[in-house]
Image (spheres, helix red, strand yellow):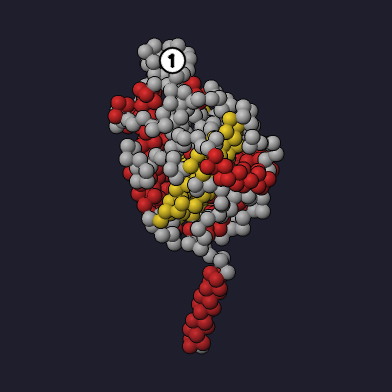
Amino acid sequence: MKKISIVSIVLFFIILAACSSQNNEEGKIETDSRPNFLFLFADDQVYESINFLNNPEIKTPNLDKLAAQGVVFTHCFNQGAWGGAVCVASRAMLNSGQYMFAARQGINQNQLWGETFTNAGYETFLTGKWHNRDATALKSFKYAKSIGKGMYETIHPEHKREPGYGRPTAENNSWNAWDPIFTGHWSPKVKDIVYDENGVKRAGPEYRIEQHSSELYADNAIDFLQNKARDSENPFFMYVAFNAPHDPRQSPKQYVDMYPPQDIEVPKNYMPEHPFDQGDHKLRDEILAPFPRTEHQVQVHRSEYYAIITHMDHEIGRILKALEESGKADNTYIIFTADHGLAVGHHGLMGKQNQYDHSVRVPFFIAGPGLKAGVRSNALIYLQSAYATTCDLAGIETPQTVDFPSLKGILDGKEDKVHDAIFGNYRHFQRMIRTDKHKLILYPHNGERQLFDLQSDPEEMVNLFEDKKYEDIKNELYSQFLALQKEVGDTLQVSLD
């Protein structure tokens, strides 16, 4: 009987192990082995702001390291905006996956990026700028800490005004980037996703934190990694969206001191003022500096811009260190990009409401399991392809409503491009098409036209529209533009004449 009992016991454990193995094959395992995702999102960060890639003036050691570890897309773009707050449209496209002319409604109607991962069993987490209303954040994420506003204005405690505009001048030079007395990034108002006693989630009350926004969001991301992500058997999807380097460009004094204004280069295409009204020519972003701009004013704004990027880079480094310490880094894809670029002195402009590369082109790189390090792709892409790409990497079905294509074919080395040209637009004022060689910008409201040869003129300084040698190129670009207009759902009548 003892022998029979022992045999029975052994058989029992063999069967149990077989069942466990079968469960593993079917994906029913105690710990989900699917990859994690850490999405790092900057606000207003131009493509030419990463030391490792293209700018020896700026210090970005953590982003440099991340870029070196993965695949860098050198020509990533935002498709456009329906209003002056370009970030709203960019984020609506990103999270709905839809082209701009559908995303305004799609962000409220369709399955969103975070929602797709939540439905797939991921622990989904948001901290930072969302900018598409509470209802969509609640729909998208299981957890959220410190959901930020679109931007944080500065207020002088004595004069009760916004001192960050029209500066610096001899009369307006009291504002500084490192003093918390001017509020802004130093005193963000935020809210969380909270659950009531019945387990129903809602947006909690707004509250103020006396801490720089970049430091706050990094703290939240680290806390999630050390707690919720660590304790869960499910993979995670983290959406960490900084308000930096959006103005007011504030950072601790040690970062401001890294960039003395007199040492900062003035852009090659610097102008005191843009030669014509592009539409919304003097909206909020543009009045940060006086008209006309001086070289010194541009240097001051660029120095503060670099400082807040370097400060954000430090906070990103803290998050990446926490990820390493969590033991989950080897199974985590990390994506870094920005919602759009910024002029900060290029072409006589300060904002992003234009179609020059400095305002529509952003950094984009991705590192993670199975991806080769040190790869650079010159493929024309939109940043909003992040949605479909992560679905492909996770083995999740991409919703049919998603327009922007996955980049996985490029990451795998099976494709070298996903678009022949990039479409750009800003309200009814501007339309653009960009290939890897040329750019055509049309301004329906005033009849202005621009054509640039990007290979010989990457700074977009020489308008070739009236040059007869470029007549065929101009007509070919316009034909491509009309086809792209139809593809993205743009119905504005735009003439080449």
Front-lying residue, 142 or 476? 476
Three-letter amino acid code of the residue under disc 1:
Pro
Residue 167 in the image: x percent, y percent? 42, 19
Element carrying mark 1: loop
**Quadrant into which the C terminus falls:** top right
Give the residue displayed 54% in from the left and 31% down from the top.
Answer: 353
Q: Is residue 210 visible?
A: no
Q: Quadrant of residue 120?
A: bottom right
Q: Name which residue lies at 50% across and 77% down.
A: 13
The residue where tag 1 is placed is: 157
Foreground of the two, 99 or 136 = 99
Give the crowd class for mark 1: few <14, some 14-19, many >=20 residues within 10 Å: few
In the rendered view, does 442 fall on the left or right side of 151? right
- In the displayed structure, would residue 80 be above or below residue 304? below
How many marks are shown on the rendered structure?
A: 1
**Residue 244: where, in percent of width, then height?**
44, 34
Of 285 and 308, nearer the camera is 285
148 over 300 or under it: above or below: below
